[in-house]
Image: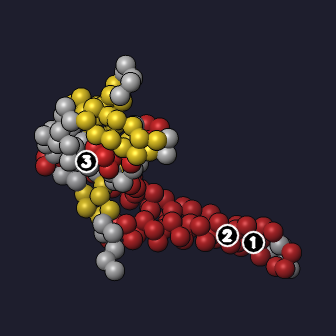
């Protein structure tokens, strides 16, 4: 099975690379030091500091592997390719939910960059998926955990 391609903005790529660098250069050393200190306490069978440090090490190594895997299959979006004709990853979309009086603006991003509380929704989320490929003026339905919402696309920007 081919690895899933990670779609990402230039900004998202920099964030991932910075996180990877910090994990490899700083976090790895910190956890290695914690393990060394815990080992100096002696008996490992009842050494909770050692167990905790080993768990932290496993989490860090898992995240490093995850980021490295994403970076192997990354597709960086070229902002020059962005159009405002239809919604795609990278678009900034203003929508109005049926029955509401105010607009909401989302930026459609790849799943690794999603931050819904800050208006960055994944192209794989129910609303993101529903908006992709549509044009300004289109009405789309998105099946969300709270039920079906009807959105009207008011504007598409870069």
Pointers 1 and 2 in contact (C-beta within 8 Å)? yes
Name the one closer to the observer, 115 or 145: 145
Q: Secondary structure at mark 1?
A: helix
Image quadrant for the C terminus? top left
| Residue 116 sits in quarter | top left
Q: Is residue 86 left or right of residue 62?
A: left
User: Which residue is denoted by mark 1 in the rendering?
Assistant: 51
Mark 2 vs 3, N-terminal side: 2
Of badges 2 and 3, nearer the viewer stands 3
Q: Is residue 32 left or right of residue 17?
A: right
- Residue 128, placed above or below residue 69: above
- Is the residue under label 1 in contact with that under label 3 (CB below 8 Å)? no
- Judged by depth in the image, the label closer to the viewer, 3 or 1, is 3
Q: How is the image coloured?
A: secondary structure
**CA distance for labels 1 and 2:** 6 Å
Q: Is residue 124 above or below residue 127?
A: below
Q: Foreground residue, 9 or 34?
A: 9
Question: Where the N terminus falls, by quadrant?
Answer: bottom left
User: Residue 25: where, in percent of width, then height?
Assistant: 50, 64
Which residue in the structure is indicated by mark 3? 132
Q: Please give the name of the residue rendered at 39% of the width and 37% of the height, measured from the top-left corner.
A: 149
- How far is disc 3 from disc 1 in space, using C-alphas? 46 Å
The mark nearer the N terminus, 3 or 1, is 1
User: Residue 57 at what x, y percent from top left?
Assistant: 62, 70
Question: Who's the residue at 19% across and 31% down the image?
Answer: 137
Instruction: Measure the C-alpha gap from mark 2 to mark 3.
Output: 40 Å
Q: Nearer the viewer, residue 136 or 26?
A: 136
Identify the mark at residue 14; answer none if there is no mark: none
């Amino acid at each position: 099975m081919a690895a899933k391609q990670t779609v990402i903005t230039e900004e998202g790529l920099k964030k991932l690379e910075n996180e990877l660098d910090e994990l490899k250069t700083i976090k790895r050393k910190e956890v290695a030091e914690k393990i060394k200190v815990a080992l100096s306490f002696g008996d490992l069978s009842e050494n909770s500091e050692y167990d905790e440090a080993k768990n932290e090490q496993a989490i860090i190594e898992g995240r490093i592997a995850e980021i490295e895997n994403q970076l192997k299959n990354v597709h960086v979006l070229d902002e020059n390719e962005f159009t405002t004709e239809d919604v795609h990853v990278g678009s900034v979309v203003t929508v109005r939910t049926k029955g509401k009086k105010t607009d909401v603006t989302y930026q459609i991003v790849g799943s690794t960059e999603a931050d819904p509380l800050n208006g960055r929704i994944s192209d794989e989320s129910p609303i993101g998926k529903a908006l992709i490929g549509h044009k300004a003026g289109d009405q789309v339905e998105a099946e969300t955990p709270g039920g079906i919402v009807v959105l009207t696309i008011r504007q598409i920007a870069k």
